[in-house]
Amino acid sequence: MGAVELEQFRLMVERNDYRGIADELARLEAERGVIDITALGDDPESAVVDNLELELEYATDFAPTCSVYGYYRYRGGEPSVIVVHPSLSAERDNFTIVHEYGHHVQRHHADWADVRYSLPAARGDKVEEKVADAFAAAVLIPEDAVPDDAGLSARALASVYAQVRASRSAVASRMVELTSTGRAGTVVVCDFEGRVIFARATDDEVFAPARGIVQPDLARLFDQAANAGGSLTAPLQVGLRAMSGWTLTDLTAELVIDHTGGYAFVVITPNQVYGRQQEWARRWHECPNPACGEVFVVDETVEIHDVCGDPKCPECAWCSCERVETFCKNCFMALSVAEQSGEVEHECA
């Protein structure tokens, strides 16, 4: 402890080594002896409830101030408080509790607190959040939960997720940290529609797609995997879509549906490892409205419809959803597309 520990923390902050900081704080907290770190990972709620330094509260109305659904309130001279906003996922609540305990830990180790509060306010807040995230991941997904021979594969991700009490996103992020050395690619958690729930890249070769964007290839592969034992590996036909409207091609995806059946882990890698040049294609879309037919680039300015997953035309706002017929208010006959657009005058029967 002391000057040596202080300097180590400073160096880790300079390297943005949040995992290293979290691992060291977990070690120091175990030495402090106020909580069993293993028990905290196995059953976060019980471990915190039994801790005399903390009170655990659940609330349905709060303004989130950090990266999870909860917050930590320090109270000097009396137990501090962890407040959790309950979600629909026990794994997410577990992550929230341990994340907030990560804030508590950062208050109780003087060397780290000195480094954290020596940083400019905005930088310090960001670092504290990152360290709390890393602390939660380290506690909920300890290194011994990952087999020594496990590589960064969708099958390994699904296997670890089935064994721990952490969210899919936490598992994916932690596995990238522990197993991705030297492998180009990106890890994605998606639903059956191909909608991205979480993504993290291992390097700059394959970008991490934005959360919420629908990837048609992943929807297709999910459907195929559901009929093929829950997993498959296949090339992407469309490619990996970016919000900019560009699509990265020449990629292969390994997809494994998790034990719940509703979500999948995906590891996307380039087809060529050495001497590869990234291949990008611009994404164009033709409006399905016969009265419009606008051809436009799908970029971040274009709205994606939640129901069909396709872009809305910037000219007429049509997407790929089945259209509801429009009827004349006088004769109640269905109007043609041309009549709806005003190009042809409707004559009542």
Image (cartoon, grey):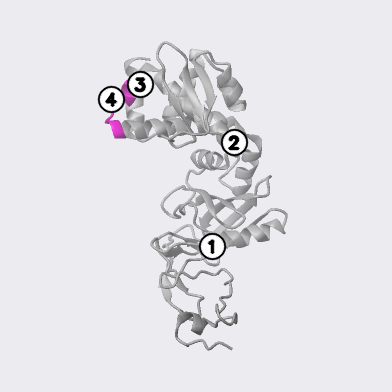
Q: Residues within 10 Å of mark 4 (few under 14, many from 20)?
A: few
C-alpha span from label 4 to label 3:
8 Å
- Label 3 or label 1, whichever comes before in sequence order: 3
In this rendering, would 346 be left or right of 203?
A: right
- Label 2 or label 3, whichever comes before in sequence order: 2
- Residue 226 visible from this viewpoint: yes
Q: Name the amino acid, label 4.
A: Ser
- Label 4 or label 3, whichever comes before in sequence order: 3
- Residue 146 visible from this viewpoint: no
Magenta portion: prevailing SS class: helix
Tell me if residue 271 is in the magenta stretch.
no
- Label 2 or label 1, whichever comes before in sequence order: 2
**The quadrant where residue 218 appears:** bottom right
Q: Residues within 10 Å of mark 1 (few under 14, many from 20)?
A: some
Magenta residues?
Answer: 113-122
Instruction: Mark 2 vs mark 3: give the one in front.
Output: 2
Q: Name the amino acid, label 2.
A: Glu
C-alpha span from label 1 to label 4:
46 Å
Q: Name the amino acid, label 3.
A: Ala
Labelled disc at residue 91: 2
C-alpha span from label 3 to label 1:
46 Å
Q: Residues within 10 Å of mark 3 (few under 14, many from 20)?
A: some
Which residue carries the number 3 mark?
Answer: 113
Instruction: Mark 1 vs mark 4: give the one in front.
Output: 1
- Label 1 or label 4, whichever comes before in sequence order: 4
C-alpha span from label 2 to label 3:
29 Å
Labelled disc at residue 118: 4
Nearer-the-camera pick, 162 or 272: 162
Instruction: Mark 4 vs mark 2: give the one in front.
Output: 2
- Residue 282 in picture, x, y percent from top left: 42, 69
- Label 4 or label 2, whichever comes before in sequence order: 2
C-alpha span from label 4 to label 2:
34 Å
